[in-house]
Structures are given as C-alpha cells and as structure tokens.
Amino acid sequence: MTTTVKPARIKNVVITRSKRGNEELSGRLKRAGFNPITVDTIYLSPPEDWSVVDGVLRRLHSFDWLVFTSAIGVEYFESRMNALSLRLGWEGKPLVASVGQRTAEKLSGLDVRPSFTPSSFLTVRLAEELPAEMGRRVLLLRADIADPKLSEGLRARGFDVEEASIYRTRFVDSGTDDRLRDADLIVFASPSAVRGFCRIVPKKELSALQRVRAICIGPVTAAAAQENGFAKTVVPKMYTLDSVVGEIVRLSEQDA
C-alpha cells in the first residue's frame, strides 16, 4: 500500500524587501497566521544630487505624460514638489500614468488622478498600451536601476521619453537570519530583492534555499528568481502584495 505524504503546511515565510517594506509585509503575514522571517536586502535613498529631478519638475507641465512605476516613487515626488513649492493636484497636462493599483491610490491621495493604468500591472504592458493620441512627450520618474524595457518600448512606439531617477536602490551588505534554514516559502517583490538576497546569503545556505518555493510578485521578478537558481516559482494572478499574501494563504491551505 502506497501512502501519499502531503507537504508540511506553510508556516515560516522569508520576506526579502527593504526594512520598511519588510515591516509592512511582516504585519500582514502575522495577521494571516504566518511566521515572517525578514531579510533586508535593499534600501532606498534620495538622489545624491537633486538638480536633474528639480529641472524636470520645474518644467513638469511641458510634458504630455508623467509616468510612475511605484508607490515609493510617488512619495519622493510629493516630497520634492513640496520642497520646491510646486503645486500638486493640477488640471490638464501632464496626464498621469500609473503602472498599478497601489501606485494609483498613492497618487489619488495627493489629489493627482491617474488617467491611465495598463491592463496588467507590468511596465512592459504600460509601454505597449500608453495612449499615443493623448501626447507623446513622456517623463518617467523612477528608481535609478529600473528596467530599461519601459523607456525602450515607449521610444519604439514613437514617444519622446525623458527619465529622471527620483530615488536610488542600494543593496544591503549583510544581515541574514539563522532561521532561514526553517523556511517554507520565500517572497520576492522585485528583481533587485532577488539579487540582493543572493548577494548576502552564504553559498551553502543559498543552495538549500533555492529548492524552496519562491512566490514572486510578477513575471519579471519570477524570471529574475529563476535566473538566480530558484526553480520553484509561483506568481499570483494579480501583481500586488495583497495578491501575494492571498497566494500564500491559498498555498498553505492547499498543502495542509
């Protein structure tokens, strides 16, 4: 007689964001009944020199589109607009595009209403779908290490794209947790988090962790995880942190 052994229920979830991001996600996971193991992999900081950002913000209304790809980018935008005494909540140009729901909500909280969100929360989809008939002069405000496919895709469609790095992403040098050996699942919310995790986890431990399922916020992050040796990747239907938590709950119930 053959006995089918089910996997152990997911309990220990490794999360690999910035310190602030880990604190936020840790709270959600605890409320859902999981034990988060936080590994700070990246940290975010303002530009060393604001001159490029300040220059484009002072001529903001010469652009047809202002594009945001993250909520944190919106936060830095708000802070710098206030520092320059520039008004938020304008009417007319530029129209505002947001790559996802959370970023759109952050903008709405500043009385900046997004005019466009792509059909799926991916920068490549935004590049494919941004309405050219509403104007072709685009300003991208995002991280210094952002994926160039967005600007490349827009330029390929004939958009005139100007970019400014409104914040910087840097890798944490050290800080792993002894509890990593107990990991049932790993969460990656960005390609940079994947790279940062692989930089700080010792090779022997990393080899074992690469056999653990990795839930990734979207296909781009999943591709980065696979390129770095994580073969068991899971992507939720919606590319949001809420969906990531929901997927963890679903997998846990499935494994129980």
Image: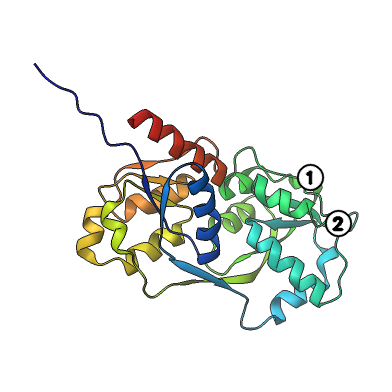
Q: Residue 184 location in percent, x, y?
A: 32, 46
Q: Residue 191 location in percent, x, y?
A: 45, 57
Residue underneath mark 1? 133
Q: Nearer the viewer, residue 90 or 129?
A: 90
Q: Nearer the viewer, residue 208 or 144?
A: 208
Which image quarter holds the C terminus? Answer: top left
Amino acid type, callout 2: Lys
The residue sitting at 52% across, 45% down in the picture is 31
Q: Residue 213 location in percent, x, y?
A: 32, 44
* 116 on left or right of 252: right
The residue sitting at 45% across, 62% down in the picture is 192
Residue underneath mark 2? 93
Which image quarter holds the N terminus? Answer: top left
Q: Is residue 147 above or below residue 187?
A: below
Asked whether the beta carbons under mark 1 and mark 2 sit within 8 Å of each other, the answer is: no
Q: Is residue 216 above or below residue 6?
A: below
Q: Secondary structure at mark 2?
A: loop
Amino acid type, callout 1: Glu
Tell me the quarter of the picture where residue 196 sits.
bottom left
Instruction: Decide which of tag 1 and tag 2 comes sooner along the chain.
Output: 2
Q: Residue furthest right?
A: 91
Q: Is residue 82 above or below residue 240?
A: below
